[in-house]
Amino acid sequence: MEAQFATLIRPYLRFLPEGEEVKPDSRLRDLGLDSMQAIELLFDIEDSYQVTLPDERLNDQTFETADSLWRAVDDERGPGGPS
């Protein structure tokens, strides 16, 4: 997971204590990501990474942890993008 990605999702995690980093196993819902924020986050991710997550990836499993969301984004970037 890129540091830039962690920085991007951090503002959406209102229950993550200030100064604590986003870890790959951070559970996004437990840290305050709700369904409305998930949509806003998705738009930010798509703009920042120039990707579009397909409808079948827009599910609870993808948004479960920071790493599961990152893997979905990285998969859409394809083999040419850095991991």
Image (tube, grey):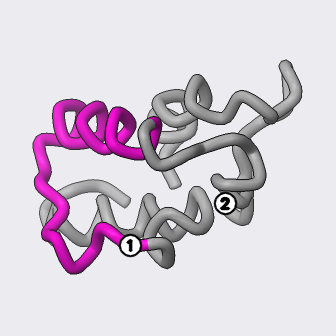
In the rendered image, which residue does mark 2 sit on? 24
Vertical placement of residue 52 versus 79, above or below: above
Find the distance from the CA under tag 2 to the CA under tag 1.
18 Å
Where is residue 79 shown, x and y percent of the image? Answer: 16, 71
Q: Is residue 3 above or below residue 73?
A: above
* Quarter of the image where one finds residue 17: top right
Looking at the rendered structure, the kind of residue marked 1 is Asn
Q: Position of residue 80 (x, y in %)?
A: 13, 62
- The kind of secondary structure the magenta stretch mainly shows is helix
Q: Which residue is mark 1?
A: 59
N-term mark: 2 or 1: 2
Q: Nearer the viewer, mark 2 or mark 1?
A: 1
Closest to the observer, 11 or 48: 11
Label 1 neighbourhood size at 10 Å, few (<14), some (14-19), many (20+)? few
- The residue at 30%/59% (across/down) is 73
**Residue 52 is covered by the magenta coloring:** yes
Boundaries of the magenta span: 37-59
Residue 67 - label: none
Residue type, label 2: Pro
> Which residue occupies 58% across, 23% down?
11
Tell me, yes or no, whether the two marked residues, 2 and 1, touch with CB atoms within 8 Å.
no
Screen quadrant of the C terminus: bottom left
Q: Is residue 63 left or right of residue 73?
A: right
Return the x and y of residue 39 as percentages of the image width and height: 33, 43
Residue 45 lies left or right of residue 23; in this view the side is: left
- Is label 2 in a helix, a strand or a loop? loop
User: Residue sitting at 41 percent across and 69 percent down?
Assistant: 71
Q: Residue at x 49, y 46 (%)?
A: 2
Dot 1 falls on a residue whose secondary structure is: loop
Residue 76, placed above or below residue 43: below
Q: Is residue 69 magenta?
A: no
**Other residues around mark 2 within 10 Å, as few (<14) / some (14–19) / many (≥20):** some
